[in-house]
Amino acid sequence: MGQPNDTSRAIHAAVLIAGAGPTGLAAALFLARRGVGVRIVDAAPQPSVTSKALAVNSRTLDMLQDTGVSERIVTQGWSARGATLHQQDKEILSFDLPTTLGAPRAITVLPQARTEALLTEALQAQGVIVERGISLKSLVQDETQVTSTLVHMEGETEEVKSLLLLGADGARSTTRQALGLDFAGSNLPEPWKLWDLQLDTPLDPWHAHIMFEPDGFIFLLRLQANLWRVIGNGHDPLGALRRTCMVGPVAWQSQFHIGHRVAAKAAVGRVALGGDAAHIHSPIGARGMNLGIEDAYVYADCAADALAGDMTRLHDYAVLRHAVHKEVVRRIGAITRLVHGRPTWLRWVRDEVVPLAAHLTLARQLMLRTVGGLDHPLKTRP
């Protein structure tokens, strides 16, 4: 655990972080490297072994470069070379990812669980250990500190005082609820189905693939060897794949519902939100984990300045990140509704207009910047 801040014997840590997903881990790592005392807790007794996110984008690799984590991600993952659009088994557009557009590295495919493990190892090297089986129950704050009540798996409660708190505790964030913040937005009605499975396919293994189907879409990305991630919102995505592919054993399957929501504020007083606690959206665009790590990067800069005496920097974080959250969720929501293929008139736009627009240079650059996390500037100050 990080060393307590010397300003007060009553303070257990300068920053308490609730949630040890990629956002919380990255924030703890960025802060610890600045010499800030940090404590990070997570309700789950063990790290997750399944992965929602798969791609580490260019901006994330750049932000993590100095920590040594980027090099390990690139070494253990593989670089996606491009993307291909299909319409009922016919390839209608294929493009490679350029090395321009200000992206110093290619998008790297590595399951989120592995990225989290690498962040955890780097954090341990800084002397900070994730405390698991501990959840945030409630919090109150005043002008000088945040007092949090933590609950251990065994039922023991603990009162912790910290100068700051970062809620990186997911879409059902206790931190956000304790702040009384609305989480406005919308949900798509149908479940999205997910499989990690063996696939014998003629598809280019170095590309991501999106297949437009009459009743929805299918997204495919190779994880390793012949293991692929498949996501679809139609009636029978695997049945559609069997038209051209040999579908093998399933390693993992799940389903989930899609929402596009942004918290009313990204920070209130000494308490801030990051990652899914502040914003959720569909996995199209590969932005969820990456946007959360970007929150962590900006938060660490603002929090370090606040702890050094400039408390206006917490307001900076709130203003900067809320604007980014709204814009990214709006853009990903629009792309998702288009790819979604419902209702019928929107499916017509998708099938007829998207292939034509995707050939245009400006449209393609916007798409590439969105996936690379480069569709807005990375700002730590207004």
Image (cartoon, grey):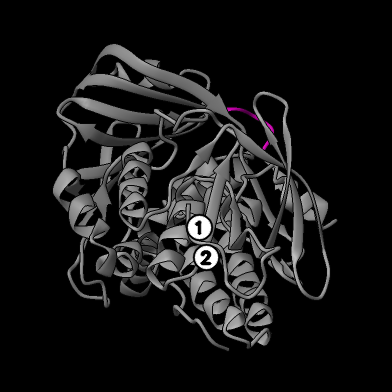
Mark 1: amino acid: Gly
Frontmost residue, 3 versus 375? 3
Q: Which residues are magenta?
A: 188-192
Residue labelled with disc 2:
295
How many angstroms separate mark 1 from mark 2 (CA)?
Answer: 5 Å
Q: Which mark is residue 74?
A: none
Does residue 235 show up?
yes
Residue 83 x/y as whole percent: 26, 50
Q: Say which element carries label 1.
A: helix
Residue plotted at (57% across, 30% down):
256
Residue 225 x/y as whole percent: 14, 28
Task: Please identify the quarter of the rendering in which residue 198 is found.
Answer: top left
Q: Residue furthest toward the top? A: 249
Residue labelled with disc 1:
292
Task: Name the image quarter holding the C terminus.
Answer: bottom right
Q: Residue 373 vs residue 95: left or right? A: right
Tell me if label 1 and label 2 are in contact, CB under 8 Å: yes
Q: Residue 172 vs residue 324: left or right? A: right
Mark 2: amino acid: Asp
* 193 is higher (above) or lower (below) than 221: above
* 244 is higher (above) or lower (below) than 300: above
Residue 89 x/y as whole percent: 29, 31
* 322 is higher (above) or lower (below) than 217: below
Task: Please identify the quarter of the rendering in which residue 54 is found.
Answer: top left
Residue plotted at (43% across, 22% down):
237
Q: Residues within 10 Å of mark 2 (few under 14, many from 20)?
A: many
Does residue 184 show up?
no
Q: Say which element carries label 2.
A: helix
Residue plotted at (21% across, 45% down):
207
